[in-house]
Amino acid sequence: MSKFSRRAGLPAHSSIIFIVLLFGMALHGQSDDESIKPVPILTGSSAYFTQVNGGQAQNTPSISPLLLAPIGDKWLVEAKGYYSDTFGQGNAGTYGGTSDYGLLYAQVDYIASRYVTLSAGRFLTPFGIYGERLLPNWIRPLQLTPLIYGVTSDSALGGMLRGGFTAGSSNVNVNYAVYLSSNNTNHILATDRTAGGRLSFFFPRHRLELGVSFQKLLQEDRAHAIGFHSEWQPERLPLTLRSEYVHQTGTYGGGYWIESVYRLSQIPHLQRLELAGRGQQFFAAQNLTPDEILDVGPLATNTSQADAGLNYYFSRDIRGSASYGRQFVLGQNTNIWVIGITYRFLVPLGPSGGAR
Amino acid sequence: MKIKHAICSTLVLCAVTLAAAGANTGGGKDAPPPTTAAGASNTAQDDALRFEGEKRFHANCGRCHTAPPKFGRRMMATIIRHMRVRATITDDDMRLILHYMSE
């Protein structure tokens, strides 16, 4: 199965009804007393990627619409779905394909104060930086998700409290998020009963962020996971360096990735080109039983991987990408090629408002 | 089913994408050109706010993605509220980035 999407989904008709309801709420809930009245927006991205993994080619067209529906000056309803179709030629020479669709998140946010925002519903788990910030395919520099993505629960169903504030004399921004998720055994909306959070420190002058995340599984083996992340952008170079580390005490092991992205904005004729590279290692948990090995799948094996790629921005919204990766697994090393294109769209669902 | 299914899916995705692209282009047309309000932005205070907003934009938003085009004020107000939650942007940063991006 492709690595492009791992989540299960809601039935399509439920998603459509839910999104229509949210949009209706937004249209009728606009506040009249704001200086700038936000307008509902339909945004997201579509993509077409071909991945050749160990000689097996798969094509994956996909679309991920995101509805943003502000209500008044304190509320925001946001719902993101996805649909993808992965098809390729099997060993027998015939084409086969599978569709995948669902709801990535559907949450209601309430801005309680300058420092606190409350969220409820299905949301992306605030653990590290990849899931919440880099997952959209028009953002991520390399299309393959890191090996450790999936070590922790990436979706939650419950409540979250988060916010950010400037500490001291604006030398550091402190960001926090804490959440509680309920157990959902529905196989297409499955979430674990977990609690966790993230604390980050961002130093704007140095463009450096350091953070720590924690997640406690409140069911089964009650394992806990701890993670660290960092991100740095030197001011004088169009370079981004990021990394994440995670370790879980249960059956999912741990690992790390380090990624660098360099935009060739200082070189004439190559300003639209971006180079990306990533190195990563995953360390499987020890002494897994045969049942646990089946349960965790690829995360049962120690794996190392190196990827290098190019992104070319045809415009601000259209990006072509290509990458090559070499995966090292004992006795089964593999080449992974990826090539494709992403398009980000953004459509106002009402008057978008003029310039200042 | 397979090849037909794949082709149908691809065509539907292309159609949706093109429709969104068309609507996007049209969406920008309802933004009136800056007139009297643009004059106000020439004040020194406004310049300082814009400079600070640009700085905060690059420090916060530029960490993950390239700069989007500037949108209408109402659109930008929605986007920045979304990013306040998604990227945990502070209240001060949010206001300055909104000022810079909705000029």
Image (tube, grey):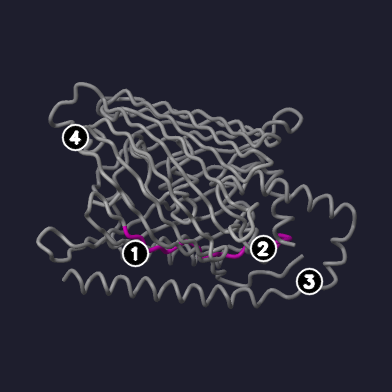
Q: Which amino acid does label 3 sit on?
A: Pro
> What chain does badge 3 belong to?
B
Disc assigned to residue A61: 1
- Distance between the Cα atoms at labels 1 and 3? 40 Å
Q: Which of A221 and A128 is in front in this view?
A: A128
Residue shown at the point (50%, 28%) measured from the top left: A212
Q: Give the range drawn in magenta.
A: A31-50
Same chain, labels 4 and 3: no
Q: Mark 2 or mark 4: which is in front? A: 4
Residue position marked by numbered label 3 in the rendering: B34
How far from the left and from the top, in percent, is residue A251? 25, 28
Query: Is disc 1 surrounded by few (<14), some (14 to 19) or many (20+) residues within 10 Å?
Result: many
- Distance between the Cα atoms at labels 3 and 2? 13 Å
State yes or no: discs 1 and 3 in contact (Cβ < 8 Å).
no
Disc assigned to residue A331: 4
Same chain, labels 1 and 2: no
- Distance between the Cα atoms at labels 4 and 3? 64 Å
Taking the view exactly as shown, the residue that stands out farthest to the right is B44
Residue position marked by numbered label 2 in the rendering: B70
